[in-house]
Image: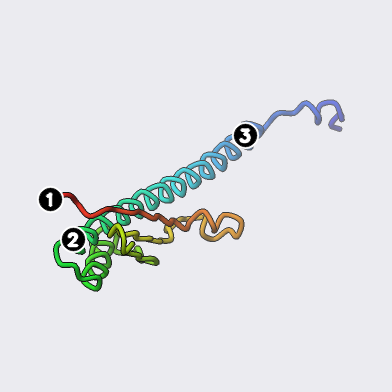
Amino acid sequence: MIDLRDRMTDERGLIGKIMILWIVLAVVLALAAIDTAQILFTRYKVTDAAEKASFEAAATLLSSGDRAAAYQTALDTVEATDPGAKMTGFEIDPATKQVTVTVTKKASTLVAGRLGFLKHLTKATATDTSEPPAL
């Protein structure tokens, strides 16, 4: 018969269980790192798209004076810079001719977009204002 004391100190199979825990932890950390990188890259791309669109729209407004052409330039620039991004705001200050562009995009993530309490982190929004370039 096996003594209770021997049963409590038996360590057979302990390394396998610890290795499984470490592997699971490594997978969770890898998924978190991939999602974090994807979110940060999306924010960078959205910011870049907003900056380029506002500058190009301000330059178009200065050269042509046409507000519709400036708006179309901003739309085209956002599409060219980041195809999945959407321009959600466009304003022209009539006094200073400054153009403000707001761009939004949802990051494609492995886990964060599927968890309700992390979903808000996947939406990237950037607003940029540019003055007409000096000639």
Return the residue at label 3: 18
Q: Amino acid at mark 1?
A: Leu
Between 68 and 9, the one nearer to me in the picture: 68
Coordinates of residue 82 in the picture (x, y in percent): 29, 59
Q: Secondary structure at mark 3?
A: helix
Label placed on residue 62: 2
Give the residue displayed 43% in from the left and 50% down from the top. Answer: 39
Asked whether, in this view, residue 63 is left or right of residue 15, the answer is left
Which quadrant of the figure contains the N terminus? top right
Callout 3 touching callout 1 (CB < 8 Å): no
Callout 1 touching callout 2 (CB < 8 Å): yes
Q: Secondary structure at mark 1?
A: loop
Residue 85, located in which quarter of the rendered image?
bottom left
Q: Amino acid at mark 3?
A: Ile
Return the residue at label 1: 135
Label 1 CA crowd tier, 10 Å (few <14, some 14–19, many 20+): few
Closer to viewer: mark 3 or mark 1: 1
Spatial CA span between label 1 and label 2: 10 Å
Spatial CA span between label 2 and label 3: 66 Å
